[in-house]
Amino acid sequence: MSYKVAVVGATGNVGREMLNILAERQFPVSQVVPLASRRSLGQEVTFGDKTIKTKCLDDYDFSDTDIALMSAGGAISKKWGEKVGAQGCVVIDNSSHFRMDPDVPLIVPEVNGDALAGYTKKNIIANPNCSTAQMMVALKPLHDYAEIKRVVVSTYQSVSGSGKAAMDELWSQTRAIYVNDPIEPDVYPKQIAFNVIPHIDVFMDSGDTKEEWKMVAETAKILDPDIRVTATCVRVPVFLCHAESINIEFAKPVDEEEIREILRTAPGLMVVDKREDGGYVTPVDCAGDFATYVSRIRRDTTVKNGINLWCVSDNLLKGAALNAIQIAEKLCNDYLKKA
């Protein structure tokens, strides 16, 4: 079984990671086609030990392509997603455009893989927000264990979540501070180097940012609409990996050691939780790693059935590219099964 796969946005951070992961996980491809805008036509990308030139999205015929991995932003997904799906190619979209569409499944394979069956309505599957994805991997086994009532999450999100320009801005501002050059914010509304910014995406009438709203709405769609979620999303001066401080209130009594053991055996998770200096995972530790890490597991004594934990994951991988490839793997194994 092999599949023709197009990667839309192949020259971006996530698109390049998609190509790397397809090769690393030995996804059964018959052909990989990197697609980009006309201005990037002919730019070279790597797939395993091969170097491939990008083709122009505007000129590409998807009718003989099995899967399109889209990571070129919401505007491109809005313009192309349904057109591609109508040609018989299954779209796995990394943007926010289709996530709340009731006819499009929003999938974290370890959490709600069964919901993938709904992809046939539009031939589109949505990849969740990066901060939501890693939280879902940690919450799912705990919700099965003791039913989660409420979640309070504060995120510490790396600049790679805003793209290459944001990573360049952190680098240039850091350098400017050391050589006493002026700081000129561009991607972010305030200086990001040696600073934290409690503002990701646009502000809404409620006072929440859209990033915070996404975590609430996507948790309801992926895991359980009865879980109450409140989020504060913060951009931090870190190049890769998102971290989250998660406070969980359960409907039933919980045992801290059972929580720890459940997380140790859950798919996609790694527990590193020693109560000593350095006995926890930081963004630097998990960059480039497929796992979602959990540390600092402890009881919250301020509520009846409360647990605190620290969750870290590479946002370009589980938060984006890896999750999309895992969706593609399950799609092929359970639904397409092309000879």
Image: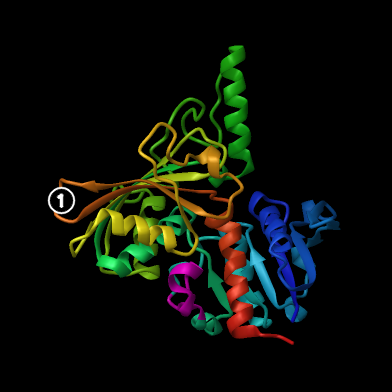
Horizontal and vertical percent position of residue 121: 52, 84
Q: Is residue 81 left or right of residue 238?
A: right
Q: Amino acid at mark 1?
A: Val
Residue 181 visible somewhere in the drawing: no
Residue at left offset 68%, top offset 51%: 12
Q: Nearer the viewer, residue 12 or 224?
A: 224
Q: Is residue 117 left or right of residue 140?
A: right
* Dot 1: element: loop
Horizontal and vertical percent position of residue 85: 63, 78
Q: Is residue 283 left or right of residue 86?
A: left
Horizontal and vertical percent position of residue 252: 18, 65
Residue 105 colored magenta? yes
Residue 337 visible somewhere in the drawing: yes
Quarter assignment of residue 123? bottom right
Q: Which residues are magenta?
A: 102-116
Identify whether 234 is placed above or below 195: below
Of the 4 image quadrants, the one containing the N terminus is: bottom right
Residue for badge 1: 303
Extreme residue in the bottom direction = 339
Of the 4 image quadrants, the one containing the C terminus is: bottom right
Horizontal and vertical percent position of residue 105: 48, 75
Residue 115 colored magenta? yes
Q: Residues within 10 Å of mark 1 (few under 14, many from 20)?
A: few
Residue at left offset 77%, top offset 75%: 61
Identify whether 104 is placed above or below 204: below
